[in-house]
């Protein structure tokens, strides 16, 4: 009987420790916004800047990345304005909808990301 009692006690302590660590390492909105800004910038540099039409491509290809890096504040604001967060104490779920204001013809995008242990994992990314 003592073995099971000790095992359950140790198991309880381990679970309590894990819950404590998860609570302390649950990322906040600011951390997510920084992560999402960085991810969006990398995506745009790798997929949009390199795919510019040839007429514009030569003219802007060298400047595209610089423009993105210089406008991090605006990109961050776009993400902040389009994000809702659900904090579940042990982890958070971030739902971001990116739309270009006043441009109905431009596509919009939806992202869902889980934040846990100070890490982010995007599990949904689609054009809407």
Image (cartoon, rainbow, N blue to C red):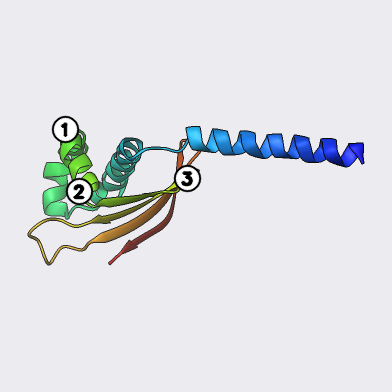
Q: Nearer the viewer, residue 46 or 12?
A: 12
* Residue furthest to the right: 1
Q: On residue 91, which mark appears?
A: 3
Mark 1 surroundings within 10 Å by alpha-carbon count, few (fewer than 14), some (14 through 19), many (20 or more): few
**Which image quadrant: the C terminus?**
bottom left
- On the image, the x and y values in percent for residue 51 come to 24, 53
- Of the two numbered discs 3 and 1 in the rendering, the one whose residue sits closer to the viewer: 3
Numbered disc in front, either 2 or 1: 2
Alpha-carbon span between mark 3 and mark 1: 32 Å
Please tell me which residue lies in front, 54 or 84: 84
| Disc assigned to residue 70 | 1
Camera-side residue of 56 and 33? 33
* Displayed quadrant of residue 115: top left
**Could you tell which of marks 3 and 2 lies nearer the N-terminus?**
2
In-image side of 64 versus 16 (left or right): left
- In the rendered image, residue 82, in percent from the top left (x then y), is placed at 23, 52
Q: Earlier in the sequence, mark 2 or mark 1?
A: 1
At a point 18% along the width and 42% down the height, the residue shown is 77
x and y percentages locating residue 38 in the rendered image: 31, 38
Report which residue position mark 2 lands on: 81
Q: Is residue 25 above or below residue 95?
A: above
Q: How many numbered marks have been drawn onto this rendered protein structure?
A: 3
Q: Are there few (<14), some (14-19), or many (20+) residues within 10 Å of tag 3?
A: many
Vertical comparison of 107 with 33: above or below: below
């Amino acid at each position: 009987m003592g073995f099971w009692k000790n095992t359950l006690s140790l198991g309880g302590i381990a679970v309590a420790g894990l819950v404590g660590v998860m609570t302390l390492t649950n990322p906040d909105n600011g951390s997510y916004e920084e992560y999402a800004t960085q991810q969006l910038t990398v995506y745009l540099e790798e997929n949009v800047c390199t795919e510019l039409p040839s007429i514009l491509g030569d003219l802007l290809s060298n400047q595209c990345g610089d423009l993105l890096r210089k406008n991090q504040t605006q990109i961050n604001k776009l993400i902040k304005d389009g994000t809702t967060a659900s904090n579940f104490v042990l982890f958070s779920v971030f739902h971001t909808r990116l739309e270009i204001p006043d441009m109905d013809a431009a596509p919009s995008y939806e992202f869902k990301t889980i934040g846990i242990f100070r890490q982010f994992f995007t599990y949904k990314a689609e054009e809407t």
